[in-house]
Amino acid sequence: MKKEYDVIVFGAGTAGVVAAIQAARLGAATLLVEKNAWCGGTMTVGGINAPSHFFAWGKQIIAGIGWELVCRTWRETGTPIPDGDYTIDNSGPRPLTMDPWIFAAICEEELLDAGTELLYHALPAKVSYDANLWHVTICTKTGLESTTARTVIDCTGDANIVALAGFEVIKAQIVQPATLDMYCSGYDLEALDFAALKTATETAIAAGTLKITDISWNNKGPEAFLRRNGKNANHIVSNGAENSDGRTAVDIEAHRSILRMYRFFRQQPGLENFRIAHCAAETGIRESGIIKGQATITHDDYVSGRKFDDAICYAFYPIDEHLNDGKGINFRHLELECLPTIPRGALLPEGSRHLIAAGRCVSSDRLANSALRVQCPCMAMGQAAGALAALSVAEGIDPAELPHEKLTTVLRKHNAIVPK
């Protein structure tokens, strides 16, 4: 690492990758720090390669660098690039899928081409602000290393940097469950007796050898799980996942869950050869720490499509609060033509200087956050954060002081869609 950077971004998920590319393309000396060996976050190591949503109500609402990366992936794999026609009068358009590993490799290529310095297998250890600089200690595989930055962007998803810096992070007592994504095989759906499987499931749950959440979100039994090959189909209680102890507990329970599920299915007629063909590297966390920002997006703001004066991007996804009791999801579509926006103030931790947060830790209440946490708005927030960081460094002012028109002008120049 160098001794100093203009911008350091922590977390190379969908927000962090875009933030780092944008900051570097604007000339900022940028370092991107990631704990895994791949970019992409939930898209890659989390197994959910279906960003939602670039389109709403028949038009594109999120573009910019995130869309550029996705389109490059589609072109590389020979996949047609869609337009917004399929979303006209459609409150629940289908997600757009892609090859996650080609996407990750393209992200890495764009990061390096932009001049970003990339550090995998590293985590933040300490951050403090003094004399107009962030002093940053990073834990690498061979020990602690120190550097400085003029602006720091927290894209960890868990608000880890904001918490390390001493600013308020809101942690709900009960959070939405996580999911360990997988792909299962080794069976013929047409040969299965689903009525008998449902009875066997109820017996196993009563005996304590299986939990309904091991194979179902909504108490529908094993049929839905098997028809979708286990894809994004379980629930894991995930309190405390913003820290290492909590995340360890979540992962251990996820591993126990898949072992219970595996043992149960292998004992059922027609499932003797059931196998887990692929499992995500990480348990996907839906909710953990949320920053207390200079502005907070509420449920009412979101579902009414409030147009904030300092809006930096749109968002479009249903209210999607997953429940811990195996009874499903509090799921509600947006009303026709509703297009929520995200304000700059929701990315700025209250009381901080030269610190920005982007992604699912954005300042919002629980129900609004259940919709804002998905990948497309995270990409859009990341681009706004990267531009805001680079411009504030160039101007020598705090991100909160940058004239909004300067920010939106640059975002549009880099093909982002900004609410008017």
Image: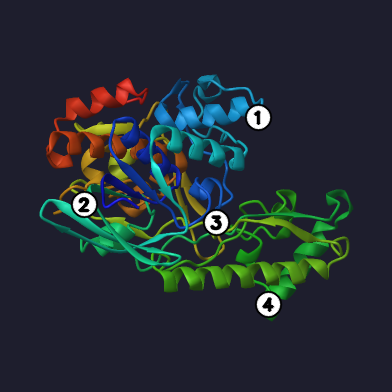
Instruction: Tell me which label, 1 or 2, sits earlier in the chain.
Output: 1
Q: Measured along the vertical axis of the image, is residue 414 above or below residue 224?
A: above
Instruction: Tell me which label, 3 or 1, sits earlier in the chain.
Output: 1
Question: In terms of depth relative to the viewer, which is nearer, 92 or 128?
Answer: 128
**Residue 126, image x, y percentages:** 28, 65
**Mark toward the viewer: 2 or 3:** 2
Instruction: Tell me which label, 4 or 1, sits earlier in the chain.
Output: 1
Which residue is disc 1 drawn over?
77
Q: CA distance from mark 2 to mark 3?
A: 33 Å
Q: Residue at x 32, y 40 (%)?
A: 302
Residue 132 visible to an observer of this rendering: yes
Circle 2 SS class: loop
Which residue is disc 3 drawn over?
328
What is the three-letter code of the residue carrying label 3? Gly
What is the three-letter code of the residue carrying label 4? Ala
Q: CA distance from mark 2 to mark 4?
A: 47 Å
**Mark toward the viewer: 3 or 1:** 1
Q: CA distance from mark 3 to mark 1?
A: 35 Å
Image mark for residue 349: 2
**Residue 374, image x, y percentages:** 45, 44
Instruction: Tell me which label, 2 or 3, sits earlier in the chain.
Output: 3
Question: In terms of depth relative to the viewer, which is nearer, 28 or 308?
Answer: 28
Which residue is disc 4 drawn over?
206
Question: In terms of depth relative to the viewer, which is nearer, 9 or 405?
Answer: 9
